[in-house]
Amino acid sequence: MIKTEKPLPAQIAPAFAALPKAPKDAMRALRDLICDTAAETGALPIEESLKWGQPSFAPPKRDGTPIRLRWSADTPDRIAMLVHCQTTVVDAWRERFGDAFAYDGNRALYVPLDAPLDTDALRYAIAVALTYRR
């Protein structure tokens, strides 16, 4: 688990504030992992914003594709890590991780809330998205 929480920018803070504790904590950890991975891969600056009311993390367009995080009361046991559906990012994730994660077609990888975050796998998944165009 990531030890430090980076302050949330004002533009995305309301989306996090509206979440119940478990998904909020996991989504904060994922956000920190996205920011850390962007720095490690040089996919900076990351533009943090809300897309469809959900936190979105966009690397420079020359580098990769945005990652959006979604939690829903309809599926309260997981967070979706979404990417643009016209990329092959989810295919790369599926090839690397197989059935270690659940997926939604070519749009998302699901992060379960009932287990510790697999930070090594998620760091790899995030790096693939943030550097997709390299």
Image: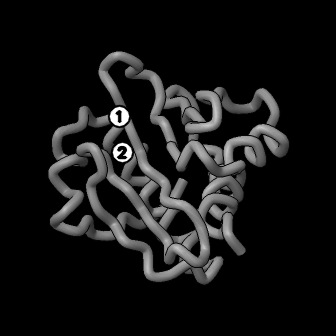
Residue 67 image offset from top left, x and y in percent: 49, 54
Left or right of 86, for residue 74: left
> Which residue is at 43% across, 74% downward?
46
Residue 99 image offset from top left, x and y in percent: 77, 27
Secondary structure at badge 2 equals: helix
The Cα atoms of the two marked residues, 1 and 2, are separated by 5 Å
Q: Is residue 78 above or below residue 47?
A: above
Q: Quadrant of residue 134?
A: bottom right
What residue is shown with label 1? 22
Q: Along the line of sight, which residue is nearer the eye, 88 or 13?
A: 88
Q: For mark 1, does the 10 Å Cα neighbourhood hold few (<14), some (14 to 19), or many (20 or more) residues?
A: some
Residue 59 image offset from top left, x and y in percent: 49, 71
> Which residue is at 15% across, 51% downward?
14
Query: Identity of the amino acid at label 2?
Result: Asp
Q: Residue furthest front?
A: 86
Q: Along the line of sight, which residue is nearer the eye, 43 or 28?
A: 43
Left or right of 65, for residue 99: right
What residue is shown with label 2? 25
Q: Residue furthest top?
A: 74
Left or right of 11, for residue 98: right
> Which residue is at 63% across, 29% downward?
105
Q: For mark 2, does the 10 Å Cα neighbourhood hold few (<14), some (14 to 19), or many (20 or more) residues?
A: some
Q: Specify how the rendered protein is coloured.
A: one colour
Residue 97 image offset from top left, x and y in percent: 79, 40
Q: Along the line of sight, which residue is nearer the eye, 118 or 95?
A: 95
Q: Are marks 1 and 2 in contact (CB under 8 Å)?
A: yes
Secondary structure at badge 1 equals: helix
Q: Is residue 56 above or below residue 77?
A: below
Q: Quadrant of residue 74?
A: top left
Query: Identity of the amino acid at label 1?
Result: Ala
Q: Is residue 95 above or below residue 6?
A: above
